[in-house]
Amino acid sequence: MSPITPKETDFIHSEEFLHGLMKRQLKLSVSCASAFLLVLFGMPLLNYLAPELMAQRVAGFTLSWLVLGVLFFPYVWVIARLFITRSVALECAEVDHAAAGNKRQS
Amino acid sequence: MNFSQIDPWILTLASVTVFITLWMGFRSAKSSKSASDFFVAGRSVSVGWNASAISGEYLSAASFMGIAGMVMSSGYDALWYPVCYACGYLFLLLFIAGPLRRFGAYTIPDFAEGRFDSPLFRRIAVCFVLFIGFFYTMPQMKGAGTALSYILPGLPYWVGVVVVGAVITLNVALGGMKGITLVQAVQYWIKMFAISAPIFVLLSVFGGYGHNLSLNHSSKDIAQPPIVQHIDSAAPQRKALPEKAPKDDAWIAPFGPLTTKAVKAAADALPVEQREAFLAQNKKPYSLLYTFSLIVALVCGTAGLPHILVRFYTNPDGIAAKKTTMWVMILIGIFYVFPPIFGVLGRNLMPELYTGLAGVKGTDAVVLRLPTLIAQKYGVLGSVLSGITCAGAFAAFMSTFSGLLVSMTGALAHDVYGRMISPNSTPAQRMRMFKWCAVLIGSISVILGCFVEPLEINFMVGQAFAIAAASYFPLLFMSVWWRGMTMKGAAAGMLVGGLCALVAAAATNASNLALDKGPMGKIFAGFTPLNHFWAGHPLLRILCEQPAIWTVPLAIILMVVISKATRSSIPSDARMKMLVLHAPEALGLKQEYIQEHQGSGH
């Protein structure tokens, strides 16, 4: 079903709606990006500051190799999955929020 | 060319891949009727097909051959490439994929013009599709030349580049985007099989991943030998490493040969008694800087590659675009676990590759050559497995080159011809122009590919990422999230950031080619003084070789400062555009925006 074209006077055209929408989306994206960047930029720093720890052997791998070459991929998949789930839920909430705003205005 | 050295299995399997690709391209060409089919596959590609197609297009010669070669030559430092190639998609998912699809344009230049109502900006954006595209096609051509020289021993490198380039150009000219979506989706699965099946056999014969890695002793192991070495002592031992191979502790540890190259070259230029102190003081900090810059280039570059971004327009909606991105991350993440294993096994079992050129006989060919070791134990199985990896390599550079050709040809045919030169052209004329532009771009790519034999595949791809990171990524990120951006700010940031990265990458490549002992060294001899300059200024060399750490912030700062200075020219409908970019499709804003802009070219 194609969506209905909104009227210009609808709540979704208000500054309040756009500001809130972008703020909530950005908050979600930034929090997921922080979890990703913390580990991504933290790895070289750990290699630099704690080389002995990162050179520990785990099943033949050095810890630095195991984390970067194997474990980092599933870590990122989990972040991606969480983002999609929350982003879909956020979109549903935004549609409800817009409908409630329109009702209030009328 | 010596025909007696040709392995029939390898030749047959590689040929089958080429013929399947061509057959599917021709078949799909029959169903590509409209301009929309050619450019965005009618916007009707499902999540599964699109994720496979994006992965198929993305996994290039750099992924299939280059990563293994670079891990073998540089060790741990090279792992940043597969990790960031795969995980860079997260940035795309978090900040760009959904909004970009909601905006509803054909190409990135379409987005640039639509967001800022500026045909001039479209022209600037088109230039970068071509810059990034050509930088990216060169390593694909290198992969083609390397693989064909391996399959047909004695065949000159350039013949491989010309033959493969011509075949793919023909395929794209006939099928357009819809033609290659199916081809690329199938090619992902060919590549996945080709990279994983030989690895399982190799690991079962030559010992596990961890075992082979443990044979490389770090400085810590020398003091305290790891227990795992004794567990699998029945597995075959490694061969002696030649002089040219990096030492174990430098190879397995972070801050190894790749990231310390500039500092070591600078140390070599100093008097012997000063070298140790210089290295002790500068090696690790410079290496850390190199690593951070590489990460920025690869993560931001993934989110700014035009031939990948254009695929998000083929999704039905924003949610589908996000789901597609997640599946792409899973598909390519699984793939990227395998190439480093080839590198580790190659170091232990085929160290003779270190002694060859960086190209045909060098570590870049480890994926193709390593499976032949199986032949010592299981006869013909070695040839079959080597044939499978050759087939995968063909699928890799064919699919990526196809995608790049569509993207660059689309920019020329749709943006330059259809919008600038002949805006009143009919769809039939545009489709005809698409075919001619494909031939032109394909020919230029082949010529460029002939020059890059001495350069490492993965290194060249990394540079294409650095240019994308400093041009398209800031443009897309800022345009999607900051409504105060003006066309002048966006254009200045993208131009200055992108061109700085382009010049820096070109200077590094030219100085590297000047070191070549073959014909390229003579052609680029004029750049030899640059290598003396790098030796005296290792920091500048790092900042040129990996420019993203300063070009990306530079582009963003310019965008902010110039947009603030020209705030009177913020598009009058900026708020509406931000709504279209961010509001869920269910609210119907996209439809409203399209109605509003009907006839105005958006």
Image (cartoon, coloured by chain):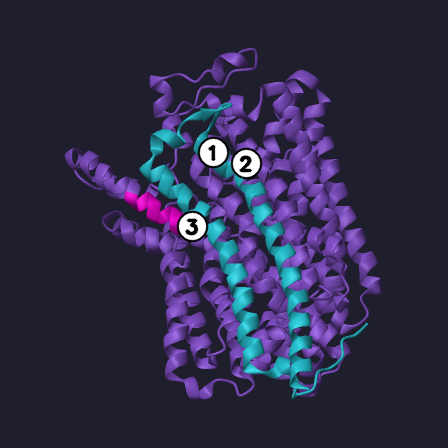
Counting labels gives 3
**Residue assigned mark 3:** B294
Residue B129 painted magenta = no
- The answer to whether residue B290 is magenta is yes
In the drawing, does residue B555 fall left or right of residue B138? Answer: left
User: Alpha carbon of mark 1 to alpha carbon of mark 2: how far?
Assistant: 8 Å
Chain B shade in the render: purple
Near-viewer residue (B577 or A23): A23
Task: Tell me the residue that label 2 is attached to.
Answer: A70
Residue B304 visible in the displayed image: no
Q: Secondary structure at mark 3?
A: helix
Horizontal side of B22 relative to B593 (left or right) equals right
Q: Secondary structure at mark 1?
A: helix
Screen quadrant of the C terminus of chain B: bottom right
Between label 2 and label 3, give the one nearer the viewer: 2
Residue contact at pointers 1 and 2, CB within 8 angstroms: yes
Subunit of label 3 = B
- For the residues beneath circles 3 and 1, the answer to whether they share a chain is no
Is B599 left, or right, of B561 in this rendering? right
Chain A, which colour? Answer: cyan
User: Image point 37% across, 70% down: which residue?
Assistant: B557
Residue B333: x %, y % from top left: 60, 44
Query: Mark 1 falls within which chain?
Result: A
Checking the image for residue A65, the label placed there is: 1
